[in-house]
Image (cartoon, rainbow, N blue to C red):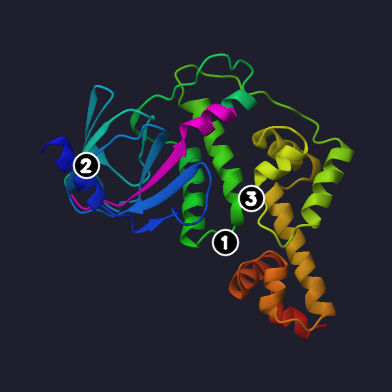
């Protein structure tokens, strides 16, 4: 099959689920369930991670970077294709996999912000089939949020994207870089500045980049120092504060639960109800009835 046909065959495999329209930055996540076939991929500016979701192992051929892999690819197996490396793939049975594309410029940005020695360009290496429980866990968390149409919001996905980038830098680069570590948490004035910012914007779609920019530090280090300071991640703290705001409105007003959900940064009645039940053990309606 010639290159043009291969590329068109890839285009024919549309994802069954994708983050394309969710506004996620630096990352694109899609689930594919193609029938047996073959395809050629060449992404100049994105690194690609493929996580097998197939219940039964699939016979696979991968050719990339001048190397060939042939074998069974089973649930939990991971393949990594660096940016600008062509990949030819052929699979003998119907497949089911998660594809995570992360922008190469974002990886370089994270490298500049977090590495002790960042003078040289960071290069990821190709991996045909590996097991990586941490990488799989990150991908599954992102996949779960995709399935729920990003109920976690941008702050949640931004945090996972940063964790993913740092993991790739630690485990899948040609040179093993040393990630700078900071201890002790955020200084109290800095922490108060961030908490005030969050509490004033509970109804808004807050991004991790916004919080890190307040203190002029990298997103990765901000997240680590924030958690050291108060024991939870920025996303978990934001969720806690939104639930507390919802409790106040449920007690003190007769606003509809839909309006309360939107005023507290949730995208729907059901989104508030799910998070509220997980955190308090009861629904917003039952909580209101007890007032």
260 relative to 229, above or below: below
Q: Residue at x 10, y 38 (%)?
A: 1
Residue 229 location, quadrant: top right
User: Is there CB contact under 8 Å for labels 1 and 3?
Assistant: no
Q: Helix, strand, or loop for circle 2?
A: helix
Residue 150 location, quadrant: bottom right
Based on the picture, tell me whether residue 103 belongs to the magenta stretch. yes
Residue 289 appears in view:
yes
73 relative to 96, above or below: above
Q: Which residue is mark 1?
A: 151
Q: Which mark is residue 7?
A: 2
Residue 128 location, quadrant: top left
- Packing grade of label 2 (10 A; few <14, some 14-19, many >=20) is some
State the extent of the magenta-drawn residues as a range: 93-110
Q: Residue at x 72, y 38 (%)?
A: 213
Residue 215 percent location from the top left of the image: 78, 36
Q: Which mark is residue 155?
A: 3
Give the Cα separation between the discs numbered 1 and 3: 11 Å
- Packing grade of label 1 (10 A; few <14, some 14-19, many >=20) is some
Identity of the residue furthest to the right in this view: 189
Identity of the residue furthest to the front in this view: 4
Which badge, 1 or 2, comes first in the chain's sequence? 2
């Amino acid at each position: 099959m010639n290159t043009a046909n291969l590329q068109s065959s890839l285009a024919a495999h549309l994802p069954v689920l994708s983050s394309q329209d969710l506004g996620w930055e630096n990352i694109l996540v899609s689930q594919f369930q193609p029938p047996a076939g073959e395809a050629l991929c060449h992404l100049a500016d994105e690194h690609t991670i493929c996580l097998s979701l197939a219940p039964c192992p699939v016979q696979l051929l991968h050719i990339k970077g001048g190397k060939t892999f042939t074998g069974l690819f089973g649930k939990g197996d991971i393949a990594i294709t660096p940016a600008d490396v062509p990949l030819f793939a052929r699979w003998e049975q119907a497949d089911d996999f998660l594809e995570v594309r992360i922008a190469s410029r974002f990886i370089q940005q994270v490298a500049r912000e977090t590495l002790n020695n960042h003078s040289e360009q960071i290069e990821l290496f190709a991996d045909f089939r590996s097991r990586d429980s941490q990488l799989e866990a990150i991908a599954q968390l992102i996949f779960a949020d995709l399935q729920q149409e990003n109920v976690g919001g941008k702050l949640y996905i931004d945090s996972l994207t940063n964790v993913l980038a740092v993991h790739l830098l630690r485990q899948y680069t040609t040179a093993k870089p040393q990630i700078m570590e900071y201890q002790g948490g955020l200084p109290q004035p800095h922490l108060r500045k961030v908490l005030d910012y969050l509490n004033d914007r509970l109804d808004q779609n807050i991004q991790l980049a916004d919080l890190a920019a307040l203190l002029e530090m990298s997103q990765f280090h901000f997240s680590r120092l924030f958690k050291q300071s108060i024991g939870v991640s920025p996303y978990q703290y934001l969720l806690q504060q939104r639930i507390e705001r919802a409790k106040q409105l449920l007690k003190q007003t007769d606003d509809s639960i839909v309006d309360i959900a939107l005023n507290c940064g949730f995208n729907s009645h059901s989104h508030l109800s799910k998070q509220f039940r997980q955190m308090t053990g009861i629904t917003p309606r039952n909580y209101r009835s007890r007032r």
